[in-house]
Amino acid sequence: MTKKHASGRDPNAKALREAERVARLHPDQQKDHPTAVPADPSKLGHINTYGALPEYYIDQVFVCRLCGKPEIWRARDQQWYYEEAKGHIDAAAVECHSCRRAKKRRGADRPER
């Protein structure tokens, strides 16, 4: 049986505290944490930066800029965004799932013609 991918949507207080605790750990401890996801440097070649590329991803807590609700941008979701969707490494989650969905329903993400 496969393990269900934990979503960062509507996290409980315990999940938020744990993600914040892991974010405060030393990088060597973060890398070995069970929730850390190793980065694949061969899939990050599209990123043109002078800075270092990540060795791993960890869950990141963020506060939605539209509604103020805290959510967790899961390490697996970051891996997909940076490595598969080819997002820029400096990009970060800023809107919760509910606000993004509502914005798409309103058509706010569609370019004007």
Image: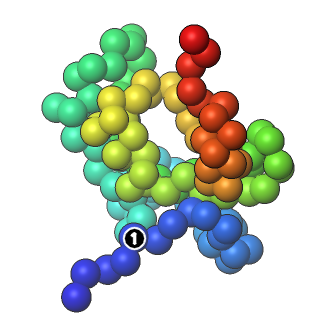
Q: Which residue is mark 1?
A: 5
Whether residue 42 sits left or right of residue 110 in the image: it is left
Instruction: Report the front residue among 110 and 19.
Output: 110
Q: Where is residue 98, by image quadrant?
A: bottom right
Q: Position of residue 16 (x, y in %)?
A: 67, 66
Q: Is residue 47 above or below residue 4?
A: above
Task: Determine if residue 23 is in view.
Answer: no
Question: SS of the residue at dot 1?
Answer: loop
On-image quarter of the N terminus: bottom left
Density class for disc 1 (Cα within 10 Å; few <14, some 14-19, many ≥20) is: few
Residue at position x 29%, y 37% from top?
Answer: 83
Q: Residue at x 83, y 50 (%)?
A: 68
Above or below 46: residue 71: below
Is residue 15 visible in the rendered image? The answer is: yes
The residue sitting at 27% across, 29% down in the picture is: 44
Please, what is the three-letter code of the amino acid marked with disc 1? Answer: His
Rendering quarter of residue 69 = bottom right
- Nearest the viewer among 53 and 61 is 61
How far across and how far down the image is residue 95, in percent? 67, 43
